[in-house]
């Protein structure tokens, strides 16, 4: 009954909703005749990259103008004028932008760190579809202080690699009526097919944060983003240039000392290694790594875990991130204002690169060498990875290989295949795992995506049921979003290069929502009301309920970027073996459990000097009740410094086992940016349950493009009275990229 109330209320709001302001609906598809076009012009005099648009090319070239809102009023003209011009010389593509603003003193800048978050500040971005396949692209972003962020986009946002790095430069300048941008992107930093009459896909976006306004040159509906490459415009009149051989070597030298917790002596660490990158024929790139080290990678952020499953931690290592979208097999992305970043499918992520070189307990397994080939030609994308790891305390040395092929078949559609293998070295070849299969992603009517895959696995000791498959339909529009699907993992399915939680299970899932906007709501500073339903239902392959969650909620989005959500979520879990949620109480016994939790979550305006996020949960938990608070406060006194303090605390009262417990976790994150090339980050985590403080401090100086100095300090300290000596480590790592 209570769920029907949500949807009756949603239907009433839909009837009452009226179009918010004068606007024109932006279509979800675009023909070539409807695309805006901007021409690139040759540079007649050298461009001095200083953010000042004083060179003659910036006044003689025809500008890209006429930006259109996606937020707050889809289809309406941008409230501020933006002019973008494109130029080139033999080695670079130049982008000059004049972003007019009638209140330049009110520009919002919150961060200048490399790969900053552009959603909470004024920003300008460009996406380049260099193969003009309307699917993939490179994104370059800056803000009024000249910060840099670069992404690699695959399949229109199915995979967004925010850790991709390119050599490029940008300078900005604040002026009396806004701010200006000059970008210089070397052709050798991009992959494309050389030839006469180059024509690429291109789009620009601008965020005016004090108005929470987002505008595009080639209009994009608010249900999508800049990564919707199929909606991009055209960049014409590019010269017949080649990307160059782009052969780069990146050696590193590392020195350090580590003391394990509970010991008294330090062990020295001295390492050398090298990465080599070479552009081959067409758009293919070869990467080779020898003795790679990832000491500079940020530590994983632990969280309170009350489930029977292990936590999912994302990949952060540079070698595995570039072109990672090519290896993705799974679902179509859904536009989501609350969580705009892609959310991995933890029921089955077929290729999860953290399985290479990282043990189950988080220890680093030495990687001896690796090679990767990625690229595109004539609508075909190919990716191949081969890695070898050393043995580590009972874990054998392994060879890994992944081969991925994907073929474009129609507008926005593709079919592909995947093969993965792990083979232990020695042991007579009896320790192995193989997974292979195919997938298809088909688009209908521009807004409906059908995504499916089917794979088989093979491994010694597993019986029948070595398979997995998934199929889903996803539709996006400005008023509604709908996703329905089913997936199944056989009893014997195994994937040593993937992440999954259960086998022998079939999952049905629904994700439905309505996005309601009206002038009457806007007058009350409410931009959107979003009633939604997310239902996951798991049953055994042979029948019988295994688990279910039915999330029913309504979210209120405010004009300033804040939101609040109210929801109710009935849960059911069948536990086949006892598991522990706290070291201070007995394990939860096997059995069936059902409970309902009520939740409020939200954030305040994240662009302000002080902002906060909050989540509160009351209701059931396993055999008892819970009261959960998850609160974080972020302080940004300037764009050079920010700090975020987070508290996660759950107080539980269980009937079986009979116990009362409290689980708490404190997390402090800070960053100070000396300039756009030098930063220091700190992550401090405290777990009162184990009386352990983990500290990770990282200093990073980008001393040359793609060349870094890292100084990393780690500490594990127990706070009990009889605590053992803390574990400590100090690492200094220097990399130097040499281009040939």
Image (cartoon, rainbow, N blue to C red):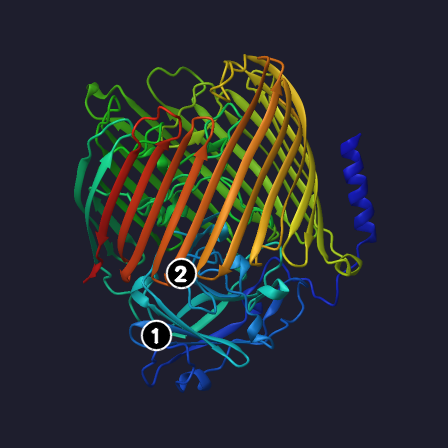
For the point 51% across and 37% down, the residue is 452
Q: Which residue in the protein does label 2 denote?
A: 131
Where residue 356 sits: x, y (%)? Answer: 31, 35
Residue 465 visible in rendering: yes
Q: Mark on residue 314?
A: none
For the point 28% across and 26% down, the residue is 262
Q: Which residue is at the far front?
A: 721
> In the rendered image, which quarter contains the N terminus?
top right
Q: Is residue 363 above or below residue 61?
A: above
Q: Is residue 580 above or below residue 481?
A: above
Where residue 22 sits: x, y (%)? Answer: 74, 68
For the point 38% across and 36% down, the residue is 694
| First reached walking from the N terminus: tag 1 or tag 2 | 2
Where residue 20 sits: x, y (%)? Answer: 75, 62
Please tell me which residue lies in front, 386 or 96. Answer: 96
Mark 2 Cα-neighbour bin, 10 Å: few <14, some 14–19, many ≥20: many
Where residue 719 sits: x, y (%)? Answer: 40, 30
For the point 24% across and 44% down, the residue is 731
> In the rendered image, which quarter contains the C terminus?
bottom left
Q: CA distance from mark 1 to mark 2?
A: 15 Å
Please tell me which residue lies in front, 579 or 139. Answer: 579
In terms of secondary structure, where does tag 2 sit?
loop
Mark 1 Cα-neighbour bin, 10 Å: few <14, some 14–19, many ≥20: some
Please tell me which residue lies in front, 415 or 226. Answer: 226
Q: Is residue 701 left or right of residue 607?
A: left
Q: Which residue in the protein does label 1 denote?
A: 239
Q: Is residue 713 left or right of residue 127?
A: left
Q: Quadrant of residue 513?
A: top right
Q: Quadrant of residue 53?
A: bottom left
In terms of secondary structure, where does tag 1 sit?
loop
Please tell me which residue lies in front, 630 or 147. Answer: 630
Q: Is residue 93 left or right of residue 657?
A: left
């Amino acid at each position: 009954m209570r769920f029907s109330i949500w949807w009756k209320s949603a239907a009433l709001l839909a009837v009452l909703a009226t179009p918010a302001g004068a606007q024109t609906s932006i279509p979800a598809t675009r023909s070539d005749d409807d695309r805006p076009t901007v021409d690139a012009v040759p540079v007649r005099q050298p461009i001095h990259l200083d953010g000042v648009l004083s060179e003659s090319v910036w006044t003689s070239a025809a500008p890209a103008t006429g930006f259109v809102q996606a937020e707050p009023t889809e289809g309406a003209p941008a409230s501020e004028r933006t002019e973008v011009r494109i130029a080139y010389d033999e080695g670079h593509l130049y982008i000059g932008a004049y972003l007019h603003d009638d209140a330049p003193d009110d520009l919002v800048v919150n961060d200048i760190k490399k790969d900053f978050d552009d959603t909470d500040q004024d920003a300008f971005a460009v996406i380049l579809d260099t193969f003009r396949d309307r699917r993939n692209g490179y994104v370059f972003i800056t803000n009024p202080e000249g910060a840099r962020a670069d992404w690699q986009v695959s399949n229109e946002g199915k995979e967004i690699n925010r850790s991709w790095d390119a050599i490029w430069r940008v300078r900005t300048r604040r002026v009396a009526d806004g701010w200006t941008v000059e970008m210089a992107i070397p052709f050798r930093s991009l992959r494309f097919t050389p030839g006469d009459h180059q024509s690429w896909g291109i789009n620009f976006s601008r965020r005016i944060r004090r108005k929470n306004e987002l505008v595009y040159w080639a209009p994009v509906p608010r249900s999508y983003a800049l990564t919707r490459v199929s909606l991009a415009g055209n960049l014409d009149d590019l010269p017949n240039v080649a990307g160059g051989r782009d052969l780069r070597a990146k050696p590193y030298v590392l020195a350090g000392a580590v003391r394990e917790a509970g010991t008294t002596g330090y062990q020295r660490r001295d390492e050398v290694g090298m990465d080599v990158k070479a552009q081959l024929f067409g758009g293919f790139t070869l990467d080779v790594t020898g003795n790679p080290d990832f000491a500079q990678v940020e530590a994983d952020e632990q969280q309170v875990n009350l489930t029977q499953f292990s936590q999912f931690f994302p990949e952060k290592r540079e070698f595995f991130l570039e072109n990672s979208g090519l290896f993705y097999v799974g679902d179509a992305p859904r536009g989501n204002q609350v969580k705009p970043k892609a959310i991995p499918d933890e029921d089955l992520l077929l290729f999860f690169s953290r399985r290479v070189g990282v043990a189950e307990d988080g220890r680093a397994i030495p990687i001896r060498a690796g090679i990767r080939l990625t690229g595109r030609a004539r609508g075909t994308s190919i990716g191949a990875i081969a890695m070898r790891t050393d043995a580590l305390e009972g874990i054998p040395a392994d060879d890994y290989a992944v081969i991925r092929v994907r073929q474009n078949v129609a507008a926005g559609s593709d079919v592909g295949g995947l093969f993965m293998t792990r083979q232990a070295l020695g042991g007579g070849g009896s320790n192995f795992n193989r997974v292979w299969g195919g997938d298809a992603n088909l688009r209908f009517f521009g807004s409906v995506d059908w995504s499916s895959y089917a794979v088989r696995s093979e491994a010694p000791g597993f019986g029948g049921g070595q398979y997995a498959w998934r199929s889903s339909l996803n539709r996006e529009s400005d008023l509604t979003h709908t996703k329905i699907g089913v997936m199944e993992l056989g009893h014997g399915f195994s994937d040593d290069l993937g992440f999954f939680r259960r086998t022998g299970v079939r999952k049905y899932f629904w994700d439905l929502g309505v996005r309601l906007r009206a002038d009457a709501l806007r007058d009350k500073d409410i931009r959107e009301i979003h009633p939604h339903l997310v239902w996951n239902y798991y049953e055994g392959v042979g029948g019988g309920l295994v688990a279910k969650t039915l999330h029913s909620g309504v979210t209120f989005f405010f004009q300033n970027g804040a939101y609040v959500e109210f929801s109710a979520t009935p849960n059911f879990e069948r536990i086949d073996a006892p598991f522990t949620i706290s070291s201070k109480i007995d394990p939860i016994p096997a059995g069936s459990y059902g409970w309902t939790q009520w939740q409020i979550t939200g954030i305040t305006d994240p662009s302000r000097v002080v902002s906060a996020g909050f989540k509160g949960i009351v209701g059931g938990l396993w055999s008892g009740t819970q009261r959960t608070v998850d609160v974080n406060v972020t302080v940004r006194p300037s764009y050079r410094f920010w700090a975020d303090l987070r508290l996660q605390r759950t107080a539980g009262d269980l009937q079986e086992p009979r116990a009362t417990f409290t689980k708490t976790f404190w997390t402090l994150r800070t960053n100070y940016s000396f300039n756009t090339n030098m930063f220091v980050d700190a992550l401090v985590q405290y777990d009162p349950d184990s009386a352990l403080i983990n500290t990770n401090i990282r200093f990073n100086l980008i001393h040359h493009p793609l060349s870094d100095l890292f100084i990393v300090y780690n500490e594990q300290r127990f706070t009990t009275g009889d605590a053992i000596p803390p574990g400590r480590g100090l690492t200094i790592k220097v990399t130097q990229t040499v281009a040939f």
